[in-house]
Image (tube, rainbow, N blue to C red):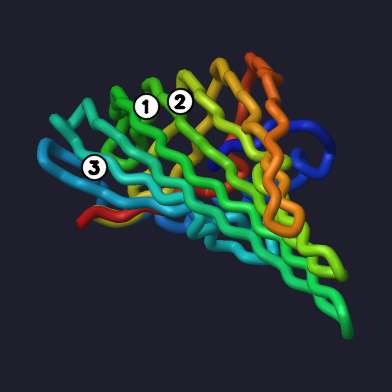
Amino acid sequence: MQSYFILKNRTDMKKIIVTIFMLTGILLSVNSQEEEGLGFSAGDKNLEVNLRPAHDFPVQMNYLKGRYFIDSNMAVRGGLEFDLASSTDEGDNWESTERVIDLGLYPGIEMHFPISERLTPYFGGELGFLTRATRSYEENGVDREVKNANGFNRIELNAVGGFDFYVYKGLYLGVEVSYGFTRQSFKDRETTVNGTTTTDENNEVNYFLGDGVNTGIRLGWAF
């Protein structure tokens, strides 16, 4: 989600390998360019998206991240995630709809350690707040609506690290990994049948501790 993806199987590893090879090719292609003054300085702002070459849609716009550089070695960051999935199916005497909405905010801070004019590793921390709302509706002689059958609220605390590689002044590529703690609590389920609503409490809470990796290439630019 997050924009972050846990490595669970070989498919994820193949996607990461493809990403690394593409990034390496881009780095080599610009290696001979002038390197003076490519990095960020105090007061600079930038915006970035994720490139996912192993996916059907290579530019992922459901997650945006911005940074403001307090000085050349420190930046505050903020991520915004918004994802909407909806489907509808219908027949002669029935109709069915499904909808899932994710909304997340990810404030944080980064410390940058330039090792050349082009390459800048960074480390930092990030808080994450994500909420998911779900809704399903069926009309087949009986009107039935279910809210938050799979809804949840998630809080994350992550250590993050990565690097920026400056292609031109104000334009960079990069990758990022994270390690942190996640608490996920599930929402109560609301079922409405022909106008009558019942609520089923859900007290389930899950905890996660582990590493993650953004399988895309970060593409950013200054403005």
Q: Position of residue 88 (x, y in %)?
A: 74, 71
Marks 1/2: CA–CA distance: 6 Å
Image side of residue 141 versus residue 101, left or right: right
Please name whichever residue, 29 or 109, is drawn nearer the observer in this view of the structure.
Answer: 109
In front: label 3 or label 1: 1
The quadrant of the rendering that contains the C terminus is bottom left
Residue at numbered disc 2:
161
Q: On residue 39, which mark appears?
A: 3
Marks 3/1: CA–CA distance: 13 Å
Image side of residue 132 versus residue 12, left or right: left
Ranked by sequence position, the earlier of labels 1 and 2 is: 1
Residue at numbered disc 1:
122
Q: Position of residue 130 (x, y in %)?
A: 51, 36
Element under label 1? strand
Q: Position of residue 19 (x, y in %)?
A: 63, 49
Residue displayed at 60% across by 55% down: 52
Q: Quadrant of residue 113?
A: top left
Q: Which amino acid type is marked by label 1? A: Tyr
Element under label 3? loop
The quadrant of the rendering that contains the N terminus is top right
Residue displayed at 39% across by 21% down: 125
Q: Position of residue 21 (x, y in %)?
A: 64, 49
> Can residue 24 be seen at all in this image of the molecule?
no
Marks 2/3: CA–CA distance: 17 Å
